[in-house]
Amino acid sequence: MKRLIILLTMCCLSYAAAYAQDDVKVVIPTTKCTNYALYPASTGVFLKLDTRDGTILAVVPSNVKKNRMLNAQPLAENAQPGRFELYPTDSSWVWLLFDTETGEMWSLKWSDKTNPLSKLPASVAGDGDGDN
C-alpha cells in the first residue's frame, strides 16, 4: 500500500512538472489611447509602462516593498498616449522598449538593480525616419 501511494505521488508530481509552463503570455494593447499598460514579466511580477513617456515601474502585488522604478526618467517630452510599447524577448528577464514615434529602442533588464535600461544602437533600432 505504501508503494502504491508513493507511486501515485510520483506520477502526480511528474504530470504536474511536465505541464507546468513558465511561458509568459503578453497582451499588447490594441488601442493607442491608453496612458498605461501592464505586462506580466514573471510569476508575481508585472511591468507597469507609462505609454506616454516610457517610465516603467516593476510591481510585485504580493510584496509592495519590492516595487521599484526601473526607469524614472521620462524618455519623451511630448506625452502622447501609446507612444511607448514593451515587447518580450526569449528571456522573461529582458524586454524591448520601443518608441513608436522615433523608432528608438531600449533593452530593459528588469532584474538589473543598477542599470536596467540601456539604449540600443541606431544600427539595431533603425534610424527612426521610417525608410528602413
Image (cartoon, rainbow, N blue to C red):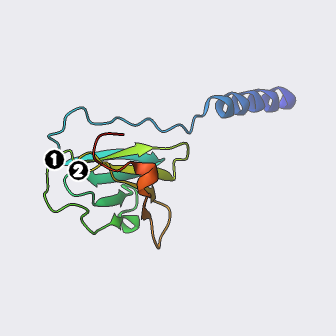
Q: How many labels does the image show?
A: 2
Q: Is mark 1 on a helix, strand or loop?
A: loop
Front residue of this view, candidates 99 and 6: 99
Could you tell me how far apart the alpha carbons at marks 1 and 2 are, in whole angstroms?
6 Å
**Badge 2: how crowded within 10 Å, few (<14), some, or many (20+)?**
many
Query: Which residue is rendered at x = 18% and y = 38% of the image?
Result: 32
**Badge 1: how crowded within 10 Å, few (<14), some, or many (20+)?**
some
Q: Residue furthest bottom?
A: 114
Please give the residue where the numbered disc 1 appears in the rendered image: 81
Q: Visible in this render: residue 44? A: no
- The reply, left or right, for residue 98 in relation to residue 13 is left
Q: What element carries label 2?
A: loop
Query: Which residue is rendered at x = 68% and y = 30% of the image?
Result: 18
Query: Which residue is rendered at x = 60% and y = 34% of the image?
Result: 20
**Residues at marks 1 and 2 touching, judged by CB atoms closer than 8 Å:** yes
Q: Is residue 3 above or below residue 86?
A: above
Q: Name the kind of residue labelled 1 in the image.
A: Pro
Q: Where is residue 78 in the image (x, y as percent from the top left)?
A: 13, 58
Which quadrant of the figure contains the C terminus? top left
Q: Name the kind of residue labelled 2 in the image.
A: Thr
Q: Where is residue 102 in the image (x, y as percent from the top left)?
A: 26, 50
Front residue of this view, candidates 62 and 7: 62
Front residue of this view, candidates 4 and 125: 125
Q: Where is residue 55 in the image (x, y as percent from the top left)?
A: 27, 60
Please give the residue where the numbered disc 2 appears in the rendered image: 51
Q: Visible in this render: residue 74? A: yes
Disc with the residue nearer the chain's start (1 vs 2): 2
- The reply, left or right, for residue 41 in relation to residue 82 is right
